[in-house]
Image: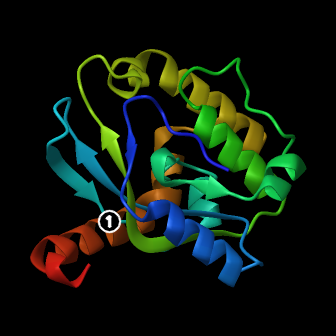
Amino acid sequence: MAWLNSDDLLLPGSLATVARYFVEHPEVDAIYGHRIIIDEDGDEVGRWVLPPHEDEVLRWADYVPQETLFWRRSLWERAGGRIDDGLRFAIDWDLLLRFLEAGATIVRLPRFLGCFRVHDDSKTVSGLYEQGEAEMALLRERVHGRRVDHEEIWRHVCSYVHRAHALQQFYETNSDLF
């Protein structure tokens, strides 16, 4: 299972890669990959190359590219079989957190699977600071049982962010290896 926002795209071969991985790794419940960022015209403007998945970091910040995320129906059902339609921005992070609560095994594949479109009218651009921050704070409070501040969040994600930055630098220098 997956969902794809109306502005985003899957890359050629992604569905075959996902299907093959799930067949070959029955112990894995959800997977995601790297992201290509495109503009309103479909032109590439950047890439996200991510380190391997870390459950603990995901409990503090959502770094999973939603358009590259796929999961098994059995996990969907264990996690409640629904999305929270009361959320506008953090719907995917809420689902991922419920996946973790349901005991999911999540893996980041070393492959570009989707394209994330950015433009001035996109929900991510227009909603991040208005509603997104409030929704993410509520999700963190649910997970950690209390409100957390930005300094505490940074303490839990900084190592991952530094690894992501180093991997991104390596990719930009050696993109022919990916």
Q: Position of residue 153 (x, y in %)?
A: 52, 48
Q: Quadrant of the C terminus?
A: bottom left
* Residue that mark 1 sits on: 49
Q: Which residue does the image show at 70% across and 17% down from the upper left?
A: 86
- Which color scheme does this rendered protein use? rainbow
Residue 51 visible, this orientation: no
Position of residue 25 relative to residue 95, above or below, is below
> Would you say 60 lies left or right of 35 here?
right
Q: Which residue does the image show at 38% across and 44% down from the upper left?
A: 9
Q: Position of residue 113 (x, y in %)?
A: 41, 60
Q: Which residue does the image show at 80% across and 49% down from the upper left?
A: 76
Dot 1: within a 10 Å radius of its alpha carbon, few (fewer than 14), some, or many (20 or more) residues? many
Residue 117, quarter of picture? top left
Residue 147, quarter of picture? top right
Position of residue 103 relative to residue 130, above or below, is below
| Count of marks placed on residues | 1
Q: Which residue does the image show at 35% across and 72% down from the upper left?
A: 163
Q: Secondary structure at mark 1?
A: loop
Q: Position of residue 141 (x, y in %)?
A: 71, 35
The residue type indicated by label 1 comes to Val
> Would you say 132 lies left or right of 21 here?
left
> Would you say 48 lies left or right of 45 here?
right
Residue 45 visible, this orientation: yes
